[in-house]
Image: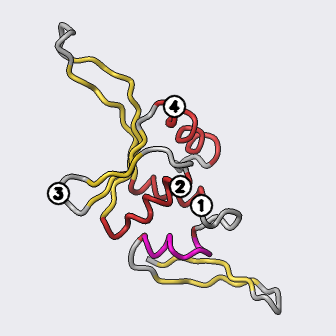
Amino acid sequence: MKVARTVRRKRSGKTRIVSKKVRSPSELVCHPTISVNSKYPENNLNGYFITGFTDAEGSFRVRISQSKERKIGWVVVVEPIFQIGLDQKDLVILQLIQKSFNGAGTITKMGTSNGWMYKVSSIKEFNEIIIPHFTYKIPFNFS
């Protein structure tokens, strides 16, 4: 995968586009001029990166639960969940996404595999952080 980034030379002030070949998403995140928000480089990823990465790797779902108290045996529980699952080598991406969302959600190991899951299932965090990001700040581009 090739990623373009803008480089500005200090002496001449000229701007040019440079391509850098990356092998995994974690290389992309660890390159500060490509993906880290320059205003808060130690805390936040660029919002466009998060939206694009979620479009490729994330999911939104609503959980349906079984209930012995109901005649039909099922109840729809409005429990929105936002999640991204990645391999161990890309754990840093999940940590940076969580930091960018003000620490919302949890990161847990997925079973016995080398996978890790970032999940936001708190309705409060979902409504105050996740929905505004993907609805108002930097929405998905479905063109």
- Closer to the chain start, of discs 4 and 3, is 3
C-alpha separation, residue under disc 2 versus residue under disc 1: 6 Å
Which element type, helix, strand or loop, lies under badge 4?
A: helix
Which element type, helix, strand or loop, lies under badge 3?
A: loop
Residue located beneath label 4 in the image: 124
Q: Which residue is situated farthest in the bottom direction here?
A: 11
Residue located beneath label 2 in the image: 99
Marks 2 & 1, CB-CB < 8 Å contact = yes
- Closer to the chain start, of discs 1 and 3, is 1
Residue 48: x and y, percent? 58, 58
C-alpha separation, residue under disc 2 versus residue under disc 4: 17 Å
Residue extent of the magenta highlight: 26-34
Marks 2 & 4, CB-CB < 8 Å contact = no
Which element type, helix, strand or loop, lies under badge 2?
A: helix
Q: Residues within 10 Å of mark 1 (few under 14, many from 20)?
A: some
Q: Of 123 and 103, which appears nearest the observer? A: 103
Marks 4 & 1, CB-CB < 8 Å contact = no
Q: Of 36 and 142, which appears nearest the observer? A: 36
C-alpha separation, residue under disc 2 versus residue under disc 3: 25 Å
Q: Is residue 110 above or below residue 136?
A: below
